[in-house]
Image (cartoon, rainbow, N blue to C red):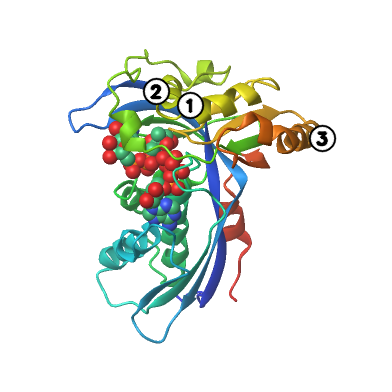
Amino acid sequence: MSRAVAPATLTLPAPAKLNRMLHILGRRNDGYHELQTLFQFLDYGDRLGFTLRDDERLELTPATDGVAFNDNLVVRAARALQHAAGRPLPGVTINLDKRLPMGGGLGGGSSNAATTLLALDRLWQLELGMERLAALGLRLGADVPVFVRGFAAWGEGVGERLIPAPLDTPWFVVIHPGVEVSTGAVFGHPQLTRDTPSIKMSRALQGGKNDCEAVVRKLEPEIGRALDCLREFGPAMLTGTGACVFCPFDDAERALEVEQRLLYDSARSSQSGCWRIFRARGCNISPLHRALKTTAAA
Ligand SMILES: C[C@](O)(CO)[C@H](O)COP(=O)(O)OP(=O)(O)OC[C@H]1O[C@@H](n2ccc(N)nc2=O)[C@H](O)[C@@H]1O
Ligand SMILES: Nc1ncnc2c1ncn2[C@@H]1O[C@H](COP(=O)(O)OP(=O)(O)OP(=O)(O)O)[C@@H](O)[C@H]1O
């Protein structure tokens, strides 16, 4: 059987995610926490370009601020695939165009890893399949599998047990309040709510909360200020363990109006003086998967 000719170059999105709610049910023996969450993608994120090389080298340009080459989730994802393939593969130059703030709760690093897994699986013609790619991704981070699978999901376990979730797809105004919170510090905090009873997805779809909010407000009061400010306009929430907060709007015009108001007012509302505000649409199919469907050989 003849194989389709694989492209030598691919450029693909690495979208952000939001946690539309996040409950913490308990702590497992390995220290990780059992969660219930609703994941949704945004049509906003980073972009990655992949070009096969004539040698076996792995290159990443530009360097990611504050992340060593060997720790970069893009590099770790490429190496995990090389290892799974178990045979020599051509090198690749990867260009990472970063728009997502790091440690923002938007899953930027995890999304970069998932895009790398899917892109290189195609460029290297590995055809490992979704199950294998999601399992490789889970070893890189709890949020990687949802980006690999590419559908908005009800997530359980540490976020690796995923079933499709029929979420509404509003416009969101997102604020990054210019501060960072460490995921580990939130999950390790003695006052974290970690005993929320398990619920069904159907109930979560009616609206929910983020159990990390109280601890995140303590660790970084600026995030609380951003939340209070957005709550003047609607049911704003924290995504993941922060630092970003978001508010849904049914129509694009209202989202634009709120974004403009916040841009105008943020100098007054913010103490850090460096809020970053953007607007994006929620989507139930990842922009990565839409792009993979339509991307042909370069
Ligand atoms: C909170 C979420 O943003 C929800 O989408 C994610 O579950 C976090 O996923 P992530 O950033 O990929 O997190 P990881 O890199 O896997 O974990 C960072 C650290 O957070 C803690 N952690 C993370 C996820 C989880 N379910 N329980 C935990 O206790 C662990 O101490 C871990 O060492
Ligand atoms: N390519 C990458 N992009 C961003 N962060 C990376 C990358 N590679 C490694 N990291 C590390 O991963 C950490 C978490 O980054 P990420 O942007 O995924 O955080 P996040 O948005 O809070 O994610 P989550 O919602 O999954 O907690 C960063 O602080 C950084 O040290």
Gap in angstroms between the C-alphas marked 3 and 2: 33 Å
* Percent coordinates x, y for residue 177 in the rendering: 55, 37
Compared to residue 264, the image places residue 5 above or below, namely below
Name which residue lies at 52% across and 15% down. Answer: 203
Q: Residues within 10 Å of mark 2 (few under 14, many from 20)?
A: some
Name which residue lies at 47% across and 57% down. Answer: 115
Of the residues under marks 3 and 2, which one precedes in the sequence?
2
Which residue lies under the disc numbered 1?
221
Is any part of residue 231 visible from this angle? Answer: yes
Of the residues under marks 1 and 2, which one precedes in the sequence?
2
Which residue lies under the disc numbered 2?
215
| Mark whose residue sits in front, 1 or 2 | 1
Element under disc 2? helix
Name which residue type carries label 1. Answer: Pro
Of the residues under marks 1 and 3, which one precedes in the sequence?
1
The quadrant where ligand 1 appears is top left
